[in-house]
Image: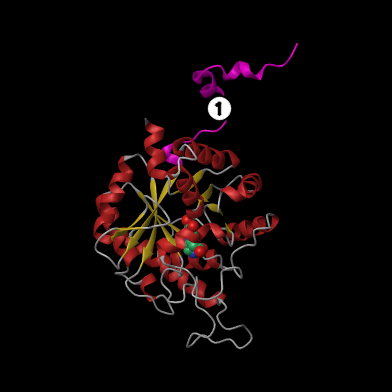
Amino acid sequence: MIERPRRLRRNPQLRGLVRETSLAVEDLIAPLFVTAASDVKRPIASMPGIVQWPVAQVAAEAERLAGLGLPAVLLFGIPQEKDALGKESHAQDGVIQRAVREIKRAVPDLLVTTDVCLCEYTDHGHCGIVNGTPGFVDERLPDGYVLNDPSVELLGRIAVSHAAAGADVVAPSAMLDGMVAAIRSALDDAGFIDCPILSYSAKYASAFYGPFRDAAEGTPSFGDRSTHQMDPGNAHEAMREHALDVAEGADMLMVKPALAYLDVIRMTRDRFPELPLAAYNVSGEYSMLKAAAAQGWLDERRAVLEVLTAIRRAGADVVITYHAADAARWLID
Ligand code: PBG
């Protein structure tokens, strides 16, 4: 007698009944780019279907996403002006602060998560203050090196300004040491003890962020991010990064990117079962699928749902994805 696992695959009802992994709209977060530098929406060439929204239109878009059943958005801002210290990142009338207020007024129940970083706000495009900036010179370190401690202090100020505007969750993405602790204590000191931190705890120095850097206009003008983001060859080190962020007070963990790091998602889920885990299906992952679909080389709907299911199967509770609106429509019909 031979084993017949095919018995359980005979029709959609049986397959649905025994499916191990579920994918639901409630698991998805939609990233949104908001710009202070334009009054009209701007398409992003390398990310078909994704645009930079002017502040005046972002609430309407958020309302549309909420109408599809999506529980949350993740905001990225493009400021009016950039400078060495990224001042607009924590300004009361900065692009994100205004966008958060608009969205919370229009759709109070939609969770607003904000990316906390400096790369979109600095004129050099780095995620912190770089060595050699007037007032920030350390002879022992190379010029242009991202200075850790002054930068995390600034990240704390950014997080507080987002929480003050009404953000529900802050998501620091700079991969600097002590970042979560600095943000937690800044939030607590300012009275935002209930504002959770979704830390980009294991974020790799990845080529798959390329299209995002067009979208957020945050390409470094020199050097790269490999002195703070993780080396793609390392998985055990990601466990160290997670453990530090847990100790510093992270409420949720993240692995980013998702597809080339499914093993890291699985390892994280097994090692840190007590914390919710997000995975970021990043811009390059989106763009390559969209490009293949545009050529007719892939069935977009099937490929997207398969990818998102795989990220969930690897162990992510939450998936941050540019496919969120499309997936939401496909999942409900
Ligand atoms: C900012 C940030 C980046 C992404 C999210 N937050 C870019 C980077 O680190 O270079 C990438 C997201 C994506 O590619 O979709 N630090």
Q: Residue at x 63, y 18 (%)?
A: 6
Q: From the top left corner, tell me how far across and down residue 189 is, in percent.
A: 44, 68
Query: Left or right of 10: which side holds 71?
Result: left
Q: Is residue 32 above or below residue 294?
A: below
Q: Is residue 321 above or below residue 199?
A: above
Query: Left or right of 274: which side holds 322?
Result: left
Q: From the top left corner, tell me how far across and down residue 198 is, in percent.
A: 49, 55
Q: From the top left corner, tell me how far across and down residue 54 is, in percent.
A: 28, 61
Please, which residue is most extreme toward the top here? 1
- Quarter occupied by residue 120: bottom left
Magenta stretch: residue 6 in it? yes
Q: Quadrant of the C terminus?
A: top left
Q: Is residue 272 above or below residue 213?
A: above
From where the camera sits, is residue 197 visible? Answer: no
Residue toward you, 41 or 153: 41
Label 1: how many residues lie within 10 Å, few (<14), some (14-19) or many (20+)? few
- Quarter occupied by residue 237: bottom right
From where the camera sits, is residue 225 visible? Answer: yes
Q: Residue at x 56, y 23 (%)?
A: 18
Q: From the top left corner, tell me how far across and down residue 43 is, in percent.
A: 34, 57
Q: Is residue 70 above or below residue 249?
A: above
Q: Amino acid at mark 1?
A: Arg
Q: Quadrant of the N terminus?
A: top right
Residue toward you, 309 or 88: 309
Query: What's the magenta region?
Result: 1-27
Colour scheme shown: secondary structure
SS at mark 1?
Answer: loop
Magenta stretch: residue 280 in it? no
Name the residue tied to disc 1.
Answer: 19
Q: Is mark 1 within 8 Å of ligand 1?
A: no
Q: Residue at x 27, y 65 (%)?
A: 38
